Image (spheres, helix red, strand yellow):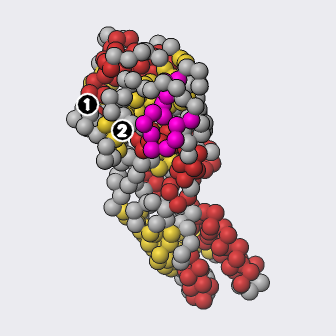
Amino acid sequence: MLIPFSMKNCFQLLCNLKVPAAGFKDAVKSGLILQSVSNDVYQNLAVEDWIHDHMNLEAKPVLFFWRNSPSVVIGRHQNPWQECNLNLMREEGVKLARRRSGGGTVYHDMGNINLTFFTTKKKYDRMENLKLVVKALKAVQPQLDVRATERFDLLLDGQFKISGTASKIGQTAAYHHCTLLCSTDGTFLSSLLKSPYQGVRSTATASTPALVKNLMEKDPTLTCEVVINAIATEYATSHQIDNHIHLINPTDETLFPGINSIAKELQTWEWIYGKTPKFSVNTSFNVLYEHSHLEIKVFIDIKNGKIEICNIETPDHWLPLEIRDKLNSGFIGSKFCPIETTMLTSILHRTCPEDDELHSKWNMLCEKIKGIM
């Protein structure tokens, strides 16, 4: 049963908090099942942070359901240039998010369910959570061949991944979250989670590719709504709590004081890109010049998302050494992103001689550089 999470019927989510409670009467006595009414990835990730940091989970476990509009979510220690097609994401308006937990990159859309199991650190148990999900799925479709693996994935028919896992363990609290593919756009997923960038060298955590499949491809009755209700029922039975899914608004500061500042931080360039472990790009590309192709070599070191070293090598007869050096030095300290490169190009144009051919080469070169960002 879905219940709007309001002042009238909530169990006081904010009991025993590190921040003042606002307008709640009764304490959470056992556990809670929540579902977000938002489809915004940053808002929903902020709920995870907020519950982990502020709720007293002792004897009060929480299960949180959330779904997002098309988004790619990378792990805490990953490199987005290694993990996904950023150019395609920009073209299609797909959001990129970096979560607080480790693990690999995942694609979210409305056909994917995200589940977050919150407990104390002592009661943290990923396998128990996955077994609960399996039990719930088999309660709906007993013939379903689903099992948890040693990597804490869920496999369908012994080979297709339908769920991946990540977690965060704090000093006293912990959470385990996982995806569950019901009717995700598999073609879009494959396109977005395939990096086109060549020559990226990094020590960042790399994702492990896997064959994926939707539950609805196996059984069309396994919609997101059916699966959510089944898991909620099994969770309520397992934890001996009321089988009610409480709907929450992740932007509601009366429920979650300070949550909007958390969501705001999660969508900053400094968090999404700036937290990428140091990496380098060593690549080359060709440009057309007088009916032949010239090779341009590029070597860039990036730290905290900003360019530390830039060495773009071009044939001297194509681009004067002085201009090339100005371009290399101009990139130092700038963000490794297309917008900043466009701004840099405009600035450098104004400092160079009025030469249409030179500007044309400069623009061509900068467009190529933007293509690897």
Mark 1 highlights which residue?
Answer: 127
Which numbered disc covers residue 71?
none
Q: Badge 1 local density, few (<14 within 10 Å), some, or many (20+)?
A: some
In this view of the protein, which residue sits in the foreground, 80 or 245? 245
Quadrant containing the C terminus in the rendered view: bottom right
Q: Is residue 241 above or below residue 92?
A: above
Does 224 appear above or below 319? above
Above/below status of 199 relative to 212 = below
Residue at image point 53% right, 77% down? 332
Indicate which label's residue lies in the foreground, 2 or 1: 2
Q: Which mark is residue 175?
A: 2
Residue lying at the far bottom of the rendered structure: 322
Q: Amino acid at mark 1?
A: Met
Amino acid, disc 2: Tyr
* Circle 2 residues within 10 Å: few <14, some 14–19, many ≥20: many
- Residue drawn at x 40%, y 33% is 116
Separation of marks 2 and 1 at Cα, in angstroms: 13 Å
Where are the magenta residues, as a range?
10-22
- N-terminal of the pair, mark 2 or mark 1, is 1
Picture coordinates of residue 185, whole percent (x, y): 51, 31
Is 214 placed above or below 56 here?
above
**Residue 157 % position (x, y):** 30, 22
